[in-house]
Image (cartoon, rainbow, N blue to C red):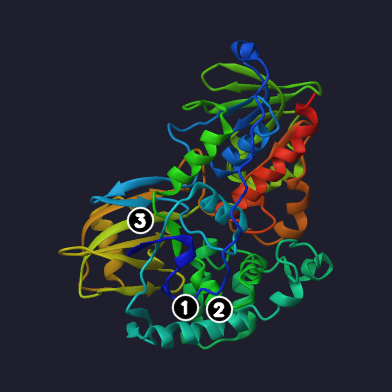
Amino acid sequence: MSNTTISGLPLTRRGVLTAVTAAAAAHTVLRPPPASAARTRNVYDVIVVGAGFAGVTAARALRRKGLQVLILEARNRIGGRTWTTTFEGEQVEMGGVWVDPMQTHVWQEIEHQGVGLVADPAADRTLFPTTTDFGYFSLEEAFGRQGELLTRFCERAPELFPDPTNPLARVDLLRRVDPQTIRDRLNALRLTDLDEKWLTGATGGLGGGSDRGAYTQFLHWWALCNYNADQYYGINTYRPASGMADLAQGILTEAAADLRLNSPVRSITDNGREVTVRTKTGTTYTASSVVVAVPVNVWKTIEFGPALSPQRRRATSETFGVPTAQKLWLRLQTSLGNTYVHTPDGYPVDTLVPIKQLADSQLMVGFSGDQRLDVNNVAQVERAVRLVVPDARVLAVKGQNWGTDPYARGGWSFRRPGQLTGLLNAIQLPQGRISFATSDIASGWSGYVEGAMESGLRAAEQVTRYAIR
């Protein structure tokens, strides 16, 4: 694993990354806020609910307009569905982690803060399904063949998503295919059993299973990667050297907002003149407007007055974030070595990525969509890994079940059938003096920090007309 500056990106795992570095963001001079006496009365210009990347990005944008901003965060930390911590003496990310030059908001932020990058190392080989079990393949063979299958799976992406940052540009065509699941598309391809195993290794786990995820969501990501397998494989390579928490803290510091941790919100009431926010501890705050910067899956846990729109109620009921998403870090003793592992639909661990060779073991990160698996139980994780690697010995494990996290209720976002054409546009709009910001409803990189920042900037613009007097 190597630290690198942004201008010197190395060749890394799963293909050559072919993208140019975005220009550095200009430093913005912050206007001083109005007199602070209003804060003693719990009155602000804008209240932001949630201190993930969407929330802190919105707060900074509002601060740059000279507004008083309060951030209410339910957890005892910032970052939302990103979370930097340690495991076996190593810095690890339990949530969102990867960034890329094609993701312009977050890339410019990295340059703006002068953050170094870590490039995850390339694997030496892969472990992919065979007709009867699993076998080792070279990177060229495994990703070459899987890339061909993905290209076939996504062959309509240029037609349906000609402008990936405007996903509804061809809504007339999308309406016909948006109801389809990934499974529907797989069935239509009539693949061999082996080809389907290889393809679902790349498509199934991302959406919480092929029967849950929308075919159009995967096409959208493919379009954002320039309809190209090498760029799709390379998108999850670079991460901030000092951690996602440090990057979020840099934005929060510039926001100069008041922050209240351990402050889960009970209710948000918009009376047409101002918005009142009540926390579960009984504290009340008021503001001209509010940015709700929590995941879509969490909206249903907050009492809104007036009630959420029908589209928002449907969205939070159906879920946008994958409700079964789990991430786990493992210290593994095995003959596996520096190997990238993909399993097909139905396995309790769907991906294992080698990160670092330790003195007596391998540090790997894995993903699971199986809620029966306790990702913090060494014995359970070892049994799950041995379904693929029979000699695996798990020495230690640290996991995060995002589905059972009360302030996430799911992991990365992956839309369900019909949500793109039936919900996205409506739930991006404000509801009275309340706007919504989350990676789940981004027009571009939903499911990534980039999408959270995009959404935070949009929400900040939406509420500004109420906040500036």
Query: Between residues 250 and 320, which one lies in front from this camera angle?
Result: 250
Q: Disc 3 vs disc 2: which is toward the camera?
A: 2
Residue 51 visible in this rendered orientation of the protein: no
Image point 65% across, 13% down: which residue?
38
- Amino acid type, label 3: Leu
Residue labelled with disc 1: 15
- Amino acid type, label 2: Ala
Residue 76 location (% of width, % of height): 43, 31
Query: Between residues 429 and 310, which one lies in front from this camera angle?
Result: 429
Residue labelled with disc 2: 229
Residue labelled with disc 3: 328
Res. 417 mark: none
Residue 282 location (% of width, % of height): 55, 16
How far apart, in angstroms, are the residues tagged by discs 1 and 3? 24 Å
Q: Quadrant of the C terminus?
A: top right
Q: Quadrant of residue 238?
A: bottom left
- Residue contact at pointers 3 and 2, CB within 8 angstroms: no
Q: Secondary structure at mark 3?
A: strand
Q: Disc 2 vs disc 1: which is toward the camera?
A: 1
Residue 108 visible in this rendered orientation of the protein: yes
- Residue contact at pointers 2 and 1, CB within 8 angstroms: yes
Q: Disc 1 vs disc 3: which is toward the camera?
A: 1
